[in-house]
Amino acid sequence: MEDLSEIKLDEGFLSEIINAITSGIFVTDLENNILMINPAGARMVGKSPGDCFDRKCYDIFDTPMCKSEQCTCKLSTSNNTVNHGETMLRVDGRDIPIEFTSRPLRNHKGDIIGCVENFIDISERLEKDRIIMEQKEGLLKKREEDIRHLQDEILELSTPVIEVWDGIVALPLVGTLDSHRAHTAMQRLLESIEYTRSSFVIIDITGVPTVDSEVASHVLQTAGAVRLMGCETILTGVGPHIARVISEGDVDLDNIIVRARMTDGLHYAIGKLAERKESMNRVASLIEIGSSQAEYKK
Amino acid sequence: MEPFSVFSLGDILLVSIEEEIDDFSVQVLLDKVSETVSRQELYGVIVDLQSLEVVDSFLADHLQQLARTLKLQDATMVIAGLAVPVVMTLLDFGIKLPDLTFALDVEQALLRLQEQGAYGEGNNGPLQ
C-alpha cells in the first residue's frame, strides 16, 4: 500500500487529481480545440470526456458569449489576463447558470499557447440567493406594514375632535399636515358631526407652523365636506404665512367663516346657536297663537 | 311603486328618496315637486337623502337644477341627512353642489328653513 507522500507527482497523478475535482475544467488551444476536459465538465453538458476531445469548445458549450468578441478564452489570451464572470450554459434547451474563470496557459518559454477554463453550476446558489432575497423582501414588507400601522395609530392620536359646546365641535390641528393626515382628520370630523349632531365646526390651525397650497386645499375641502353635512365651518388661528399661502392659491372661501382666535370662533358659534334657539321659540309661540286663534274661531 | 315618497308638512314639502332611485324616477320626482310647490304655494322643500348610500353625478345635477327651479318659484330647498360615506364619495368625485343648502337631519332642515326667513319679518303669513 503506497502512502500519499510516496506517490510521484507525475502527469498521471495530476490528471487523476483534475478528474477528481467536481467543478468543470477544460483546456483549449488558441483555435478553441478542446485538448483536455475533466469528467465533471463533460457531465455538465451530458457528455463523456471522450466525446469532447478535439472538438471546438463552442460546439460543446453553448453560451451567449461564444464565437463573439466576448469569448472568455479570446479575452484572456489576447489580453493576458484572468477573466471571470457569470453566464448561461444552454444544455438540451435548458439554461444552467454558471460561473466561469479563464486564464491563459503558457509553455516553458512563457508564450501563451492556450487557455484553461473552469466553471461551476451556480443554479443552487442563485436559488438560495433568490430565497434569501424573498425573505428579505418579506421582512421589509412586514416592517413597512408595521410602520404604516404605527403611523395610523399616531394619526388617530393626533387628530382629536373635541365637543366644546352643545352643537359645536372643534378640531385643533397640531404639527405638519400631509394629505393622508388631512384625509383622516376629515373623516373623523364628519363622523363626529354625525354622532354629536353638531351645527358648527371650529378648525383651529394655530398649531400648524406652515402649509403648502395642497394642504390649504385639503383644509378648504374639509370645509366643503362639512357643508354637505349641513354644518358650518369656522376657521381660526390662521397665521400670516398661512393666510398668504391660502390667498395666493385659487381657492373659494365662500363656505368658510374665519375668526382670528378660537375664542372668537366659539363666541360666533354660540351666538348663532342662541339666535337659532330664539327663532325656534318664536316659531313655537307663533304656532301656539295660531292654534288658539283657530280655537277662538270655532 | 315609486322609489320616493312625498309628504306635506303644512307649508313645507318633505321628499324622502329611497335607495337606488333610477334616472327616470328622478325626473318624475323633480316634475312632481315643482308642480306641487307651485300649486300649493309652498315655501320650503326638504329632501331627505338618509337612505341613500351613494349620490351619483346625475342625481347631484338634478338636485341642483331642482334647487334653482324652486328658487325661481320663491321656495327654498334643503338637503338633509347625507351620510359620511356619501359625503366622502362626493368629495372624491369632486362634486361640489354649490347651489344647495344642507342640514344634518330633517329637524335641522326645518330650523334652517325658518332661519332663511321663511317665517321672517313681514312673512308670518303661513301660520296666521
Image (spheres, coloured by chain):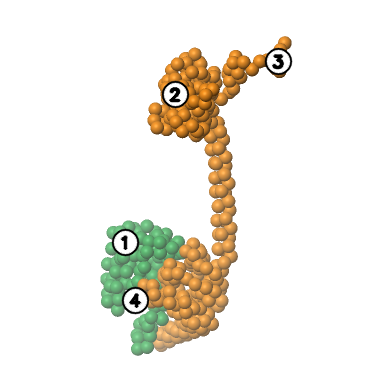
How far is the residue under mark 3 from the one under mark 2? 36 Å
Q: Nearer the viewer, mark 2 or mark 1?
A: 2
Which x, y percent locates residue B44? 35, 76
Rate crowding at label 2 as few (under 14), some (14 to 19) or many (20 or more) other CA atoms within 10 Å.
some
Q: Which residue is mark 1?
A: B58
Mark 4 or mark 1: name the one nearer the start of the chain: 1
Residue B76 numbered tag: 4
Tell me the quarter of the picture where residue A297 sits.
Answer: bottom left
Give SS at disc 2. Answer: loop
Residue A30 numbered tag: 2
Q: Could you tell me which residue is drawn at 34 percent across and 65 percent down?
A: B60
Q: Could you tell me which residue is drawn at 28 percent across and 71 percent down?
A: B34
Subunit that carries the residue with mark 1: B
Residue A196 numbered tag: none
Identify which residue, A249 or B97, lies in the foreground: A249
How far is the residue under mark 4 from the one under mark 1? 21 Å
Type of amino acid at the residue the image marks with label 1: Phe
Q: Could you tell me which residue is drawn at 53 percent across and 80 percent down?
A: A262
Which chain corresponds to the colour green? B
